Amino acid sequence: MTNRKKPALGVFVYFAIAFALGTYFTFAAVQGNFGLFSRAEIEAEADALQVQLDLLNTDIAVMENLTRRLSDTYLDLDLLDEQARSVIGLLRSDEIVIR
């Protein structure tokens, strides 16, 4: 005669809760606000913003160079002549304009 015992209901509940919590935390680790997918999106956005920052820093350097070249302490006559021609439309007396 075999006397079989039924497994306790508490064991099934315990494993069901453990499985549910494990599943929830695994899902949160992959797709949650601080999960792997979010981290990949943030890193891609950071790379794109770094590229934009580098372009803006290059533009700032060009502008600073032009500003320095037109400052009172250092005057670049070629740049001044170029700006006078493009902005004001000045010409020298020995130049001929062809339209």
Image (cartoon, rainbow, N blue to C red):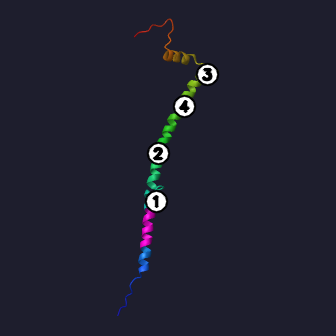
Number of residues whose C-alpha sits closer than 10 Å to that of mark 1, classed few (under 14), some (14–19) or many (20 or more): some
Q: Which residues are magenta?
A: 16-26
Q: Which residue is mark 1?
A: 29
Q: Earlier in the sequence, mark 2 or mark 3?
A: 2
In the rendered structure, are the residues bearing label 1 and label 2 in contact, judged by CB atoms less than 8 Å apart? no
In the rendered structure, are the residues bearing label 4 and label 2 in contact, judged by CB atoms less than 8 Å apart? no
Element on which disc 1 rests: helix
Tell me what residue is drawn at x 42 percent, y 70 percent: 19
Disc 1 marks which amino acid?
Answer: Ala
Disc 2 marks which amino acid?
Answer: Glu
Q: Dividing the picture into quarters, in which one does residue 23 lie?
A: bottom left
- Find the distance from the CA under tag 2 to the CA under tag 3: 38 Å
Q: Is residue 64 left or right of residue 10?
A: right
Tag on residue 60? 4
Tell me what residue is drawn at x 51 percent, y 17 percent: 82
- Find the distance from the CA under tag 3 to the CA under tag 4: 16 Å
Tag on residue 71? 3
Q: Earlier in the sequence, mark 4 or mark 2?
A: 2
Number of residues whose C-alpha sits closer than 10 Å to that of mark 2, classed few (under 14), some (14–19) or many (20 or more): few
